[in-house]
Image (cartoon, helix red, strand yellow):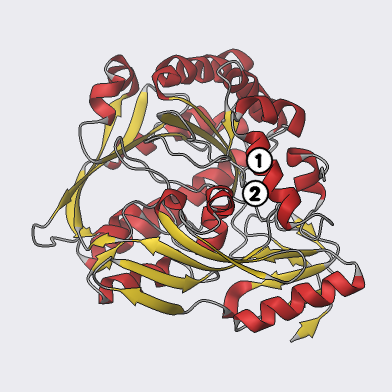
Amino acid sequence: MKDRTSWTNWAGNQSCAPTSIRRPTCEADLVAIVTEAARAGTRVKCVGAGHSFTPIACTDGVLVDLAKYGRVVGHDPGARTVTVQAGISLATLSDELDQRGLALENMGDISQQSIAGATATGTHGTGWHFGNISSRIVGLRLIAGDGSILSATAEENPGVFAAARVGLGALGIVSTVTIQAVKAFRLHAIEEPRRVDEILTDFDGYMSSADHVEFYWVPHTGWALTKRNRRTDEPAVPRRKAKEFLDDLLITNVGFGALCRIGRRQPSLIPRLAKILPSTGRMEYTDRSDRVFTSPRRVKFYEMEYAIDRDAIPEALNRVRALVDEAGIQLSFPVEVRVVAPDDIPLSTAEGRATGYIAVHVYQGTPYDAYFQGVERIMGSYGGRPHWGKMHFQGYESLATRYPRWDEFQAVRSQLDPEGRFTNQYLDRVLGPLTT
């Protein structure tokens, strides 16, 4: 199906007017789209759920919407792997895995993303000993700029495999992904407010005190909202439906959204409103892993996230706290802190180092330049790497110095897309011109 229309991302801060939108249902459709674009000399970009805050999916050419390209196409019970079409959402993938007695090893906090979009941008969860989602890819199929199909694993086309696991959509259209899953498990969750200074005093001890730990510092307070998840085979003890509705919809979305709207209209009230968040109390429950990892996100926002050496997180967060106080920035949204294990993917934000993440947010429609630029200057002093799907102000000149395997990625890019079929303004900015 073809049509001529516009496209806008989830947050509403990015839009484009492609010449057409295509909605493939099979790999042959993808090949045809790229082959036609190559003959016409037009550019092509893919979009999944549109949850990136950058214009990484925008194009003035053909936009490929993967919404109808989301089936499971293979399952190896012995190896605990599944092969899926690139447009499958993490929510659907989690359901499909659960039916097979499997689960994703780690997840972020939303499940609407497509597997291709999540891995192309290096999306991650949290866990001292666990990597990002891309690090669990064991195989993929890719449509290159001339319409040819490449299969890639650690043994077959290993250079392509290494780079394409976090490919930014710059290497081609990912058709299928083979994911290394694990035996299905449950998570025992404890969510409670804690003093942020106590956490930072023993940051390593706290962040390794459970399998998956994260916290959100609440600006204008000394409190953090914390979440510690322990992997378990114990029976599920989920929240009651009424409690889940109260927590996830009424408090986290409706109530928090109302506070954000009030704060946007009257920023001077934000410090007083912020004190409401740590008063939500303690929760403890056990449920299927993906149901604990993820939660609904209906309050729209803009986000920037930086990856730095894990050991630098306490100092960096304290500098962000000082920035907020000294600049008088009024913030409705908490500041999120997570950690992941290192990996070996050239453009992964966790490549080669144990990594901590600091993510800053503002409510949709709220000015952010001064805040985000101030945080970016702090993160730059630690060699920070911005999340590829979240807002930042970096270009390829500075980014190239922060990735030891930058040239390796660029070589694969030149090999697979020498004519720039998959480029756009964002990739031109962050990756630079193609070299052949």
Look at 41% across and 72% down and name the residue there.
92
Of the pair 314 and 245, the residue shown nearer to us? 314
User: CA gap, disc 1 to disc 2?
Assistant: 6 Å
Element type at mark 2: loop
Q: Report the residue marked by disc 1.
A: 391
Look at 46% across and 21% down and name the residue there.
317
Mark 2 burial class by Cα count in 10 Å: few <14, some 14-19, many 20+: many
Question: Measured from the top left, where is residue 353 in percent x and y?
Answer: 44, 28
Look at 63% across and 47% down and name the residue there.
364
Q: Report the residue marked by disc 2.
A: 53
Relative to 10, residue 128 above or below: above
Residue 12 in sight here: yes
Q: Amino acid at mark 2?
A: Phe
Label number found at residue 76 = none
Question: Measured from the top left, where is residue 286 in percent x and y?
Answer: 17, 56
Residue 300 in sight here: no
Q: Where is residue 209, by image quadrant?
A: top left
Of the pair 374 and 405, the residue shown nearer to us? 405
Q: Where is residue 246, by image quadrant?
A: bottom left
Q: Where is residue 192, by image quadrant?
A: top left
N-term-proximal mark, 1 vs 2: 2
Mark 1 and mark 2 in contact? Answer it, CB < 8 Å. yes
